Amino acid sequence: MTVVAGVDVGNTTTEIVIARVGAGDPEILAAGRAATTGLKGSATALDSAARLLERVEEADGVRAERIALCRQQPVVSFDLPLHHRVAVEGPLASLASTATTPSDPGLGVGALARLGAVEPGAPATVALVGRDWDFEDAAGRIDELVAAGAEIAAVLVEADEARLIGNRTTSSLPIVDEIDGAALRDGETVAVEVAPPGATVRRLADPLWLAARFELVEGDLPAVEELTRRLAEARCAVVIGTDGSRPGVEARPEVRLRARVDGIGRALTLPADIALLGSVAPGSVTEFSVSGVEMPPGAGDLGAIRDAFAVALDDLRSGAWLREDRLHLDRQPLAVLAAEVPGEDLRLSAERAFARPALVLGSETEAARRGALTTAAAPPGSCVCDLGGGTIDLIDGERQLTAAGAGQLLTVALATLLGLPEIVAEAVKRGPCLQVETPHLARTETGEKRFLASPAGPEAIGRLCVEDGGRLRPFSDRLGAEEWRTIRLGFKRRLLAANIARCLRELSAPPPALLLAGGVAEDAEVAAVLSRHLGESPTVVATADVGGRFGPRHAAALGLVLLAAEEEAAPTSGR
């Protein structure tokens, strides 16, 4: 009898199962998990796993005599900037702004001038308040200019101070903040509109009104109509003329890769060919490069890339009426899968980290299947899908597939969309939210009223919140609860379900059952979204209960124990 620790070092989470193996079924002695530190397969990640094993052993009074690991394929999920300083739409452009707190409602058109350069008696002027202005000084200067006969039509502010300035001026002016002043030129015509709370802009969403104000010709109308369609749901907007001389993009990196698409080798360029990533065969990427931007930490150290996956953020608008100014769409989330760390190198590194013998037993996909099939009533022909932080590992009786893009890519994507830190997005992605209306009352995503068990703090009032560890975590005041539900479920379908479907297409036939394992499978919405995405497929989607005790977690770790037990019994059985 030998005590073995199955150590599954994932891209985001490390899981361990300790069991006594020998004759008969393994006896599970202990289990634990913790966040992975460092890149999967690295010495840092193995050292972190060794510390976790020591904590589990100490807590349960056991000691593993040997370690069993999978071969390691690291994944990095990140986003690349696709920043547009000015979104050029033919003769007019909407100035990129994330403003959510404009000042007084109104409409103003005038020539742009820096506040310090505006003269008393100046004709219609849109004043730009730079970051070097204190908001009280800016408000005072605006009042002085108006009193001296200057016609201030509207005010643009670089800092987040529209209401601070508006509350201190005697004039009621449309004021929009969080403006990129570097995208504006002195003297150019600028139109600014702020709608009342709960309403949207009217004039700046009217193509004929804009055409008249900017003296455009009939041939310009289609491009102007495209711009106004995107402004139709905006609370505030800023429009400028381009004169055909303004570069529309500040930075636009290109991702180039070569992979097998529908059985044919293809060269793809992202974001232009992003829709084709759903047809790339998992693991078939042979060339990968990024130009025009520095890769984030960790992503530049992966070496050879074997797979990549991304989803176009704009695709969220398909089938839903989402307000244009509610989401951040200026970055592109992307996941890339590296080649495996060589098995012998991994074994030696693991033995140094754990200070005991180590076995490298097959792939993580194979281990996950062995562990997941310990689920009661799992059909023998089940296909197992291990949804981890970095990868989707799918295996049936014939094929093993590993694809980039899973839980961590979803976290990165939602952090990008909502402008959140990733640690907050991790909590937000898991399920339904509450719209907190008063300290004692909230509204659910289904419109039901709910009384809170304890009063909500002032930071939660009027915001969307998730319940995280017994407390409310606010994350947005820009979206309604039903709107967020549409976005969250839509993105799980377009990212997780679409990526799983990409793997299933590589199988010879649809499996009778698809058993979901891994940390992402703890999210009950994933199975429902996937089942709906597969539509008329005969495949039944279910969630694993590993060993009848772990739920979808610890599948690969337990699978490694089972593989180690077979290895232990091999000399006796003559294998």
Image (tube, rainbow, N blue to C red):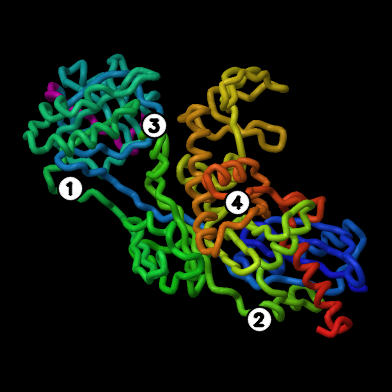
* Amino acid type, callout 2: Asp
- Observer-nearest residue: 107 or 511? 511
Spatial CA distance of label 4 from label 3 is 31 Å
Q: Position of residue 361 (x, y in %)?
A: 72, 75
- Mark whose residue sits in front, 1 or 3: 3
The secondary structure type at the circle numbered 2 is helix
- Residue that mark 4 sits on: 539
Spatial CA distance of label 2 from label 4 is 39 Å
* Tag shown at residue 246: 1
Residue density around tag 1, few if under 14, some if 14–19, many if 20 or more, within 10 Å: some
* Amino acid type, callout 3: Trp
Q: Are marks 1 and 2 in contact (CB under 8 Å)?
A: no
Q: Is residue 441 within the magenta segment?
A: no
Q: Where does the N terminus fall, quadrant-wise?
A: bottom right
Q: State which tag comes first along the sequence, 1 or 2.
A: 1
* Amino acid type, callout 1: Arg
Q: In which image quadrant can residue 61 be found?
A: bottom right
Q: Residue at x 80, y 68 (%)?
A: 562
- Mark whose residue sits in front, 3 or 2: 3
* Amino acid type, callout 4: Thr
Q: Residue at x 53, y 60 (%)?
A: 503
Q: Which residues are magenta?
A: 121-136
Residue density around tag 4, few if under 14, some if 14–19, many if 20 or more, within 10 Å: some
Q: Is residue 213 above or below residue 14?
A: above
Q: State which tag comes first along the sequence, 3 or 2.
A: 3
Q: In which image quadrant can residue 438 be found?
A: top right
- Mark whose residue sits in front, 1 or 2: 2
- Residue that mark 3 sits on: 321
- Residue that mark 2 sits on: 345
Spatial CA distance of label 1 from label 3 is 30 Å
